[in-house]
Image: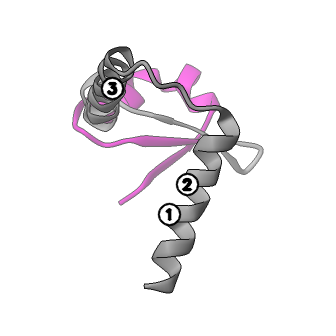
Amino acid sequence: MINIRPVSDLRNKFTEIEQAVKQGEPVYLTKNGYGSMVVLSLEQYAVLTDEVERKLDEADRAASADPVRLSENEVFEGVRKRIDEHRTV
């Protein structure tokens, strides 16, 4: 079940939120009835971001090894072309 709490619980019931997060349960915080933030354990956060970080490191290495540099327009034109090609398939 999704754990949704008012943001004031972060201050007033920190221990309860901490225990939920330690059990692997994200806690969704609301402010004035609207979603404000999600609290995750460091382990959960790492699971979400590790692959992205690895891919960014890989892209940095590839960019360092390749002297070719593209402008913003060249990059977006290439992306648009690939999207258009995909749509016609």
Residue under pointer 3: 53
Mark 3 → mark 2, Cα distance in angstroms: 22 Å
Q: Residues within 10 Å of mark 1 (few under 14, many from 20)?
A: few
- Front position in the image: 5 or 58: 58
Q: How far across and down, in percent of the image, does residue 17 sit?
A: 41, 31
Residue under pointer 2: 79
Figure quadrant of the N terminus: bottom left
Q: Which amino acid type corresponds to the residue marked 1 in the rendered image?
A: Arg
Q: Which amino acid type corresponds to the residue marked 3 in the rendered image?
A: Glu
Q: State yes or no: discs 2 and 1 in contact (Cβ < 8 Å).
A: yes
**Element type at mark 1:** helix
Residue depicted at 57% across the width and 20% down the height: 11
Quarter occupied by residue 55: top left
Q: Does residue 3 show up magenta in the picture?
A: yes
Q: Is residue 78 above or below residue 5?
A: below
Residue bounds of the magenta highlight: 1-30
Residue depicted at 77% across the width and 44% down the height: 32
**Element type at mark 3:** helix
- Sequence order check, earlier mark of 3 and 2: 3
Q: Does residue 66 show up magenta in the picture?
A: no
In the picture, the disc for residue 1 is none
Quarter occupied by residue 36: top right
